[in-house]
Image (cartoon, rainbow, N blue to C red):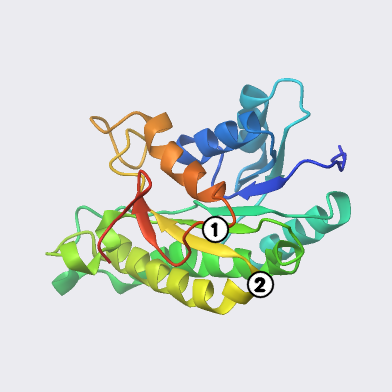
Amino acid sequence: MAVQPGPDPVAVVTGANRGIGREVARQLADRGHHVVLGSRDLAKGERAAARIDPGGTRVTAMRLDVADAASVAALAERVTRELGRVDVVVNNAAILYDTWARARSADLDEVRRALETNLFGAWQVTQALLPLLERSPHPRVVMVSSKGGSLAGMTGGTPAYSVSKAALNALTRLLAGELRSHRVLVNAVCPGWVATDMGGGGGRPVPEGAAGVVWAATLPDDGPTGGFFRDGKPVPW
C-alpha cells in the first residue's frame, strides 16, 4: 500500500522491527513523526508497525537490508517518490555482539561482516537519504553507537562490535563537520546496556535506552552536532 504524503516530519529508523529500533519508532510516532520502519524481514517489520500503529497512519514498514546497496537504493527511491522528504535518519541496525571473541584471535570474516552492517550500512543509508535530509528544515542524523566503541574505555573483548562502533563514531565526526553548513545535526548515542535480544537480560528498560536516541533525533536547531551522548550527556570518545 502506498504511503500517503503529508506535512508531518518523516523519520527513517533502520533495524526497527524489534528492540531499541522499534521503541525509537514508537516514541517518534508519538511525537508526531511519520516513521518509516526499516526491517530486513518485511513481514516482521509489518508486524512491528501494526503493533505500534494499528491504524497504519503513522508508521510504515519498508524492507531494508542496510548491508545491501540495492535494498538501500530501493528504500530511498520509494521514500522520495511517496513521501518526498526525510527529516530524521536513525541508523540503529547492528549485528554481532561478539562476547566470545578476542582481538588477538578474532575471526576476521566476522569482523568484516560486522563492519558491513554497523559501519558501511549506516554510511550508505545516510548517503542515500542525504539529498532529502538537506532539503529538510530541521535535519537530524543519529548513529546508535555504544560505549563499547569508546576508545577511552576499551580494554579488550567484543572486537568486531567494538571496532565497528568506534569506526561509526569516527564517521559521526566526519559527517557532522561536513554537514554543519547544511544545518544537519549528526550525533552518536549510546543507549546503555538495554534488555534486548542483543543485549540480553538484566539491562535497563528498552524505553529508557531509546529515549536518548529520540532526544538526539529531536534536538532544537541550536543543539549539538558531532557529539557522543548517553541520556543527553556527553560520553568520552
Question: Closest to the observer: 79 or 183?
Answer: 183
Element carrying mark 1? loop
Q: Which of pointers 1 and 2 lies earlier in the amino acid sequence?
A: 2
Select label 1 or label 2 by which is in front. 1
Question: Farthest top residue?
Answer: 54
Element carrying mark 2? helix
- Residue at the location (58% across, 31% down)? 26
Which amino acid lies under the numbered mark 1 shown in the image of this protein? Answer: Asp
Percent of width and height locating residue 169? 39, 67
| Residue 222, label in figure | 1
Question: Farthest front residue?
Answer: 222
Q: Quadrant of the C terminus?
A: bottom left
Which amino acid lies under the numbered mark 2 shown in the image of this protein? Answer: His
- Residue at the location (54% across, 47% down)? 15
Q: Is residue 17 left or right of residue 227?
A: right
Question: Closest to the observer: 6 or 128?
Answer: 6
| Residue 182, label in figure | 2
Question: Closest to the observer: 22 or 138?
Answer: 138
Percent of width and height locating residue 24? 53, 38
Q: Is residue 195 left or right of residue 207?
A: left
In 3D space, how far apart are the residues under numbered discs 1 and 2 (Cα atoms)? 13 Å
